[in-house]
Amino acid sequence: MKDPHLTSFSDFGLSETLTRALVDANYTTPTPIQSQAIPELMKGRDLLGIAQTGTGKTAAFALPILQRLAPGKPAAPRRVRALILSPTRELATQIAESFKTYSRYMNHMTIAVVFGGVGHRPQEDRLKRGVDILVATPGRLIDHMLAGMVTLHETEIFVLDEADQMLDMGFVQPVRKIVKELPKLRQTLFFSATMPKEIAGLAGELLFNPITVKVTPEATTAERVEQRVIHVETAAKRRLLLDVIVAEKPERALIFTRTKHGADRVVRQLGQDGVEASAIHGNKSQAQREKALASFKAGSTPILVATDIAARGIDVSGVSHVINYDLPNIPESYVHRIGRTARAGKSGIAISFCGDDERDYLKDIEKVTRQKIPAEDRRGTIALSPRSDRDAGGDDEDRAERGDRRNPRGNQQRHHRPSGAQGAKDGHHHPGKRPESRPAAAGGKPAAKPQTARPQHRDNGAQEETLGRVGFLAGGREKPTRPQAAARPQGDSRRPQRNGGNGQRRQEV
Ligand code: AMP
């Protein structure tokens, strides 16, 4: 059957300046969301895009916006012609970078990004001059609006990106406040990876006769991920992690924990065990997160420990392994997590540690992904960590942290949700039944192992030894040695690398 969608960028009728920039960026074939959305957006239609990072959604909206704005007059002082709202500063920065990439041959297209956590003044100076394309997080934009630095009365195009994440982070009211300031006559683009009721309602309010485009990359991504579960005592996870790192020698591994403290603890313990790693989560400063991500991308610290929200939007090619140190208590997070590997047509490995108290999470994950993940039982085979440095969220800080977090529907997260959950009864999260939820990952087909570099071990003789690592690593396994040359990124260099979308709640913006 003939593909009903356009298959080449030249079919879109984009300007020569844009097509030249796409050639530079090595974009040869539009992604499904691009081929479906771009022609409609160029006609001025509103759009409901059910898609997430990794689908090419940024170019799907950026290219038509640039095409539309190019012939018009530049923005007047304190005015914005196109506004893109993003829940996190990392995503905002990535979007602005994409706009810059695509508009590189356009004269006078001004692009600015504003977000919280940094000084107001430079942003104010920029806004006062007027901006053609403004990418902003909601809280800081409202600050600037209240301070009279910017007005949205002449904004022609409005993009709400990652709307479900906005909800998750408590930004729906600020978003509504911003929308009130926009002209009624405008083009609106609304993107969300999932469509919980509140988000569908918001989309209904904001969009006029939209075209709906739904793309589901994760099912195909997940098919290429070799998935495994290892049943283990919670107190043995630390050793197991080291064991897995030594055995797998990941080129680049993203390790997930449920909590920020858990992430810090894993980094600390890996350090004590001679493996360098860094953490990325909402308690880290912007500079720390950027640094961690940059050295992960560059391959100089090939092990990054992250929480779910922090990892959202991370698109680094060459993530060979995703390790779920803790299983997520929201099954869709599992699909999100393993989708960090197997990007750009590569295969990847996802290894999940399942403690006794996480069995229900595993059942829920298998239900949602409609597959049984091959499991290995290592209980009773690995020495347990001393009580003093046990992990997996057992301490008070973790409990406090988890108690403070809410699920995407604004409710307390459930940590011991029985399989099959009460979702239908309480009207909340019930992924198995929601037609809008991302479809299941299928298969779990074993994939070829990527070429891996050895994990970096550093000589930390001066440091306290807590696990007796030499003993652990003995017996045919490699002994930790001095630092080795960093694993070089082996990603597809054609694909511009992107930063992670991170988000803590309100204070991030
Ligand atoms: P996004 O979903 O917008 O976050 O994009 C994911 C990644 O795919 C980014 O690194 C983009 O630069 C890249 N990308 C987007 N569209 C294309 C395309 N048509 N061809 C190649 N790479 C693309």
Image (cartoon, rainbow, N blue to C red):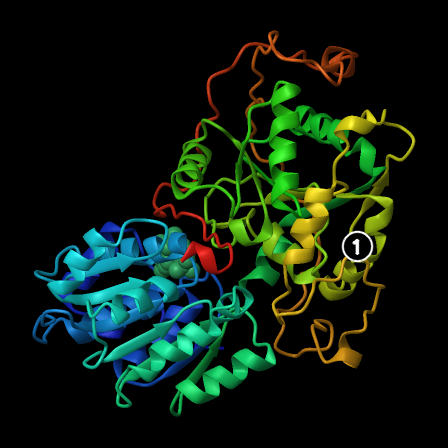
Residue at 40 percent of width and 43 percent of height: 286
Q: Is mark 1 within 8 Å of ligand 1?
A: no
Residue lying furthest bottom:
209
Q: Inspect this view and state whether residue 121 appears.
A: yes
Residue 383 is left or right of residue 276, and the answer is right
Corner quadrant of residue 396 = top right
Q: Position of residue 471 (x, y in %)?
A: 78, 11
Q: Secondary structure at mark 1?
A: helix
Q: Is residue 337 above or below residue 428?
A: above
- Nearer to us in this view, 88 or 59: 88
Tell me the residue at 75%/28% (across/down).
389
Callout 1, which amino acid? Leu
Residue 234 quadrant: top right
Q: Which residue reaches farthest right?
A: 380
- Compare residues 379 and 137 and report the one nearer the observer: 137
- Which is nearer the eye, 417 or 189? 417
- Residue under label 1, please give it: 362
Quadrant (top left, top right, bottom left, bottom right) of the C terminus: bottom left
Q: Is residue 433 left or right of residue 7?
A: right
Is 104 positioned to the left or the right of 87 in the image?
left
Q: Ligand 1 lies in which image quarter?
A: bottom left
